Image (cartoon, rainbow, N blue to C red):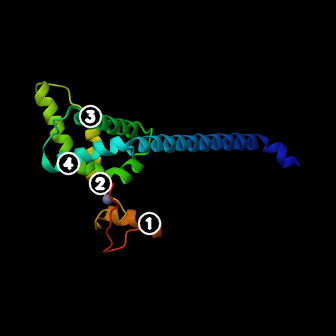
């Protein structure tokens, strides 16, 4: 039993270190849980009927470059962009996981990009060109979405080393098969 007495300081240090590790793991798990809850909440908002309609209106602006004249429609577009800007801020401040935001939203964001550019230009022209930039954080997210390449079949296979490593690290059932390409319309 002598060895216990001689190494009790060491044992105390190990126990203290273990306690720190356990509390760190708890904090990290709690944070992840909070991030998931926050993401679920913003996802539910973005998939609500009116915001879904707002997003499709922005997509339409991307294609036609025509901004609706109807005040109600314009307000809905602004509100939708406000929620997306908020999601961009949440992702920037790590309130929600950026990886989830990009994985789920990279295509819808890319489809909105041109429309957002037109709407922003329209607002700035209406308020004078020195007017403040509307939805500044959304623009950062739009750039990230444009550069994002998913390992899922929604994106065409990309043979860069980075992409190959990511694909091989993905769980096999979720990995992209060569030639397979599909998208769920959002
Ligand atoms: Zn994709």
Q: Residues within 10 Å of mark 4 (few under 14, many from 20)?
A: some
| Residue 155 at x, y percent in the picture | 30, 62
Q: Residues within 10 Å of mark 2 (few under 14, many from 20)?
A: many
| Residue 107 at x, y percent in the picture | 29, 54
Within 8 Å of ligand 1, the CB of disc 2? yes
Give the spatial CA distance, label 4 vs label 2: 14 Å
Which residue corresponds to mark 4? 60
Q: Is residue 90 left or right of residue 12?
A: left
Asked if labels 1 and 4 touch by Cβ distance under 8 angstroms, the answer is: no
Within 8 Å of ligand 1, the CB of disc 3? no
| Residue 20 at x, y percent in the picture | 64, 40
Which residue is nearer to you in this view: 157 or 47?
47
Query: Given the current orientation, which residue lies at the most extreme bottom position?
Result: 179
As helix, strand or loop, the secondary structure at mark 2 comes to: helix
**Mark closest to the chain's N terminus, 4 or 2:** 4
Task: Judge depth for marks 3 and 1 and give the one in front.
Answer: 3
**Mark closest to the chain's N terminus, 3 or 1:** 3
In the rendered image, which quarter contains the C terminus? bottom left
Q: Identify the mark at residue 78; answer none if there is no mark.
A: 3
Which residue corresponds to mark 2? 107
**Mark closest to the chain's N terminus, 1 or 2:** 2
| Residue 8 at x, y percent in the picture | 79, 42
As helix, strand or loop, the secondary structure at mark 3 comes to: helix
* Figure quadrant of residue 128: top left
Asked if labels 2 and 4 touch by Cβ distance under 8 angstroms, the answer is: no
Give the spatial CA distance, label 2 vs label 3: 20 Å
**Mark closest to the chain's N terminus, 3 or 4:** 4
Which residue corresponds to mark 1? 174
Q: Identify the mark at residue 118; answer none if there is no mark.
A: none
């Amino acid at each position: 039993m002598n060895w216990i007495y001689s190494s009790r300081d060491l044992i105390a240090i190990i126990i203290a270190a273990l306690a720190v590790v356990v509390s760190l793991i708890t904090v990290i798990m709690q944070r992840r849980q909070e991030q998931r809850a926050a993401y679920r909440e913003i996802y539910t908002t973005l998939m609500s009927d009116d915001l879904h309609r707002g997003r499709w209106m922005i997509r339409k602006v991307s294609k036609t470059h025509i901004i609706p004249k109807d005040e109600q429609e314009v307000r809905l577009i602004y509100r939708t962009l406000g929620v997306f800007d908020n999601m961009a801020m949440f992702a920037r401040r790590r309130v929600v996981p950026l990886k989830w935001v990009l994985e789920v939203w990279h295509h819808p964001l890319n489809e909105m990009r041109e429309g957002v550019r037109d709407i922003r230009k329209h607002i700035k022209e209406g308020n004078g060109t020195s007017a403040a930039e509307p939805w500044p954080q959304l623009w950062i997210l739009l750039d990230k979405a444009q550069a994002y390449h998913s390992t899922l079949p929604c994106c065409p296979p990309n043979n860069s080393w980075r992409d190959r490593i990511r694909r091989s690290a993905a769980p096999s059932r979720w990995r992209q098969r060569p030639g397979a390409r599909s998208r769920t319309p959002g």
